[in-house]
Amino acid sequence: MTKARSPIAERAIVVGKPDKRRYGARLAFQVLHAGNLGDIENATFLLNTGVVAAIAPVRQPSWEGGRRFELTLEGFPTATVAEAQGRRLSHAILWTAISLNYGVRLSYRTQEPVAIFDRTASKGNSIYAEGTVSNNPQVVQEQFAKGFAVEQVDPQSLLSMEIFCSSSLEASDRATFLTAVSALEPLVKEQSLGAAVNTFVDGCLTLLRTMDSIDNQIRNSLEGRINQLRQESIRQALRRLIIEKLPDHPTAPGLVDDAYALRSELIHNGRLEDYDIDLAIETRKISGVLRLLYARTLGLIPHVRVEI
């Protein structure tokens, strides 16, 4: 049995024998300003496990607001241990923001917020570049004029458009995907499933009301849930909406159904079982569907071609 080391002894190995504790975990995040973090920059602090933590500002694109920082943990014998302990970085940062009541945004492009690295590997040379694409100002004015010419847009579509347009400014693929798929829901109006379903539901309710052995509070809750069976689910209504609005795009209903299934998996499990799924690609698919839906709603044609 391995004898537990004191934090001081463990830290001596982390610092003095890096090849024995070669793995680390890093997490990038953004806050509004450094004051949210107590103006801590380029600081190292020691945790009671013996692991060494460090926080430092990192380069960020010029268009990003706020301040981006990177928090690292160093001192793990295997990548597996680093991954398990690294997950604690996420909830530690999020809890700090919740406790002190400020905003934070995790910045990552993978399935998990935390990245694992080998602290003994040479970083080598690096280069940084940034580029932007500018639209033709005449085209921008033309599209604005066409949008302004639409006299009225229903509140549900307007909310959906707002959610969708903000999704591309999210800092992670996961947040971008969830926000884009969420933009579909305001467009949905669930319909009744018909008389036969109503008859079935009425029969279930009649039987439920005879069940005196079920607590009254639970029975009332079940009654409400059973009544919901009279209408389509959100997923069914989405599929019907896409078929009605985009009849010339036979693959669109399947794309939306798949995206909604991935969203449900993320919401309920916190992650996707299949790590090979590229959420950036899935977001592009659903974005194409949404852009077509908005175009049909406003009676306009997108200037940039939509491919789904």
Image (cartoon, helix red, strand yellow):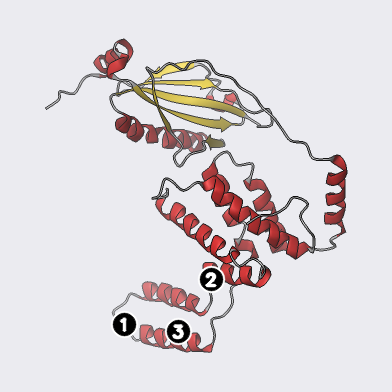
User: Real-space Cα distance between discs 1 and 3?
Assistant: 19 Å
Count residues near mark 1 (Cα–Cα under 10 Å), then give few for <14, some for 14-19, many for 20+.
Answer: few
The mark found on residue 9 in the picture is none
Eye-nearest disc, 1 or 2: 2
Q: Amino acid at mark 2?
A: Gln
Which of marks 2 and 3 precedes in the sequence? Answer: 3
89 sits to left or right of 245: left
Mark number, residue 201: 3
| Cα distance between the residues tagged 3 and 2 | 18 Å
Quick check: 123 above or below 219? Answer: above
Residue 23 sits in which quadrant? top left
Q: Residues within 10 Å of mark 2 (few under 14, many from 20)?
A: some
Give the labeled residue for mark 2. 236
What residue would you read off at disc 1? 212
The quadrant of the image that shows the N terminus is top left
* Callout 1 secondary element: loop
In the displayed structure, would residue 97 be above or below residue 17?
A: below
**Three-letter residue code for mark 1:** Asp
- In the picture provided, is 169 more to the left or to the right than 267? right
As drawn, 170 above or below 207: above
Pointers 3 and 2 in contact (CB under 8 A)? no
x and y percentages locating residue 13 in the rendered image: 27, 14
Give the camera-side residue of 229 and 61.
Answer: 61
SS for callout 3: helix
